[in-house]
Amino acid sequence: VSSNSADIGEALVSASVGSNDDLDFAQEDLLRVNEAESAGFMGRNSQAQWLRALESKVEQTEGEPSFADYRLPGASTEAFNRRAEALHGRQQKSGHTQAHANSATDYYFYLDKTNIDIEIGDPNVVPSASTARSLFGYYKHAVHSPFKLVDDEFEQQLQVYLNEKDGRVTANVCPKWKAVMNLVFAIGARYSYLVDAEWRADDRDHLVYMWRAIHLLQLQNLRALVSHPEQRLIQAIGLLALYYLTIGHVSRAWFMIGMAIRHAQAAGLHLRYENPSIPNNRRNSLAELWWALNSVECVLTAILGRPRAISANDCTVPPPGTVRTETESRSREATTGNVSTTASVYSHVSGSSTGEKSAAHNLDNFAAAYVRLDILMDKILAGLYSPRKSVRSWKGAQSMMTSLSEELETWALQSLPQGASAAAAATVDHSLDRERLLLYLYYYNAKICITRPCVCKMDERIREQSEESSRFNQKTAEACIGAALDIAALLPDVPNRSWYYANGPWWCATHMIMQALTPLLIELSLDCVHLTIDKSHVTSCVEKLIAWLHSMKTVDAVSESAYNVVTKVLSRQRSEDAAKKQMPHPEHSQALGRQEYGPLPQQPGSQSYQITSHPHPLQHMQPAWPGPDELNNMPYFPRPDAGRFYPNNAPSSDYLTGSNTGMHEFGQPQMSLFYANPFTATMDQWDWDSMAVEDAGHGPGRGMHQYQGQSFGGGPSQ
């Protein structure tokens, strides 16, 4: 802060004066909370914290005390102590001490407490080849953009495996490869159910595939979790994290993605490969895997508000769209994608194609734009919502919001060729393609995250602030409300959940709607002090978003839980206050929904599946082949055709043609451990080139994952 501004109000208060206040303090001993009642730590950018703030405003009809004490910024112990004293003083003034305050868990609408343990029998059972191809087709369409966690090599191996299955030949594959396959099927099954596809799985089939993968990976065994890094293990754990995300077990997903990232870092995937002996298609697939893990973690960080496992300062692997060396550029055409491989499976979902080259180019551009926005989201969350944000002054926070907003608009100029009004108009007749819709939604999502700290009565929190600061606070809050309204405008007026799951961020569909709904409800509770439009328009958008949750809850338990939390909070208002502020006042009669699964129906010729509190009992198996697979010496399921890991570093194509492969043994050689980082470059030093992706050697798929999580302990997850 400059000397001539030292006496200005915004320079004399901590950045915690904004709506995301008290980031640097924990007020609940989560280790002493009953496991069944705790959702764990949730940061200020989580919607549970915003719903808790909304309820306090609904119940405090007289408003918060004016000019409460927020103390000076600073990083010293004394500064922290003074901010803690100020926090206690504000709590006493408002009458909300921690002893009487509701826990954020009361507003947590995700499903980590849901019991999804089932007994799956033999984990080596594989669906019919036709079912497997359908599930993979849905997975590839729904997940490869933007989370390409499995590479083209795996797809080729899967086709060989299924072709042999058609010929009634039993291929010998390693457990990790088969685990990846089952997780792909689990995600495809979940997606097909959500979009109400012409061919779709049962709403619980995904659980069977997931649990088969869990048993094949032996995740109940700690040794499996700390084993040497392998590509298939990294893919499997990353897929499991995405699966948990799609079924609403986001806390489990956060743990699993951190584990996948640690394995990836141990293999050096966070660094740029410059060894000429490594083929470029291999470099590309490993880079895509790294950025897919990064993207999954970015979603989970935005949902939970927890710290990331990835530090930008430790990462030099180039993201999609980065200018490459001349040697790399010449070799890309060797790895062009094949976008039509599974088109027949999901053509009814994705719509008509404009040609393979055009589709591949669009997907490459989308991948580059999506990853760049992920990198910016990391800066947004770290700059505005990290615990040490409060060491800065509010003036410093305003500067940060300005800088981040400029970066976001620069991204939009490169990635969003149409304006918001054009996007909303295209949505009405469903002419906005999936990739553009996703980019618009995530653009508005990022804008909400940047501007949301100003959505409060700042004029009643900062004494003697400058007119410039007051105008900034007002305009920034208006931008936040505008972005939330834009998300609502992108959705059709009549809810169509199948369209939303097929074209929107189906892996976190409820999160995106709640991201728009919570600031609008906060603004209505403040009596629309930041609005320059008719209040009734905000009310109609709120009702529209709630109607979307109501429509989605018939197929998604996360949406049902979110709907119940919102109606519970809104039912706390007095009728006269709701009428005055034009806030919805729904009746709340349901307890929070917690999805439970009963016994799965037995199909002809299939095994019976039962809900159980314990995994299948493990047995000890002898190694089927001598080799480096340390899991052969661990407790495992008996299977006479269990494969081994290939003993050398041959590419996977050699697995199909090698003279010593009597059966196809798809696996992944162990990767060298990485112990040091000789690079000093950071992501901020990369030279972005939006045209560089036109001839990139990436495959057409980019993808993400889906569905609900699990517990892999011995008891129920209740």
Image: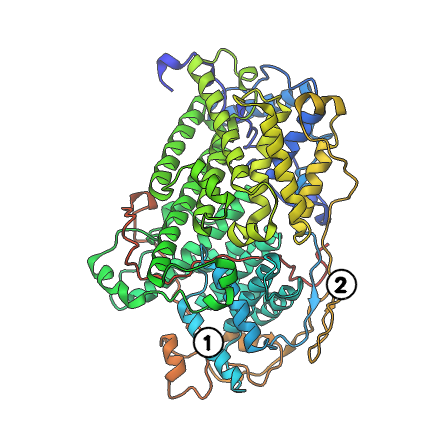
Q: Amino acid at mark 1?
A: Gln
Q: x and y percent of residue 237 in the render?
A: 52, 62
Q: Residues within 10 Å of mark 1 (few under 14, many from 20)?
A: some
Residue positioned most to the front: 429
Whether residue 666 is visible to the viewer of this picture, yes or no, is: no
User: 307 above or below 168?
Assistant: above
Residue shown at 69% from the left, 80% from the top: 605
- Residue 691: x percent and y percent? 27, 50
Q: Residue at x 51, y 47 (%)?
A: 299
Residue 485, above or below 621: above
Identity, as a three-letter code, of the amino acid under mark 2: Gly
Label 2: how many Cα within 10 Å (few below 14, some 14–19, many 20+): few
Q: Is residue 208 left or right of residue 465?
A: right
Choose top left, top right, bottom left or bottom right for residue 207. bottom right
| Any part of residue 316 in sight | yes
Q: Tell me how far mark 2 sits from mark 1, CA to CA.
A: 34 Å
Earlier sequence position, callout 2 versus callout 1: 1
Residue 430 spot, x, y in % from top left:
50, 48
Give the percent coordinates (x, y) of residue 623: 54, 83
Q: According to the image, label 1 marks what residue?
A: 159
- Between 48 and 481, the one nearer to me in the picture: 481
| Count of marks placed on residues | 2
Kindly identify which residue carries mark 2: 598
Between 502 and 621, the residue placed more toward the observer is 502
572 relative to 456 in the view: left or right: right
- Residue at 33% in and 63% down: 283
**Residue 213 vs residue 98, the one in the foreground:** 213
- Disc 2 element: loop
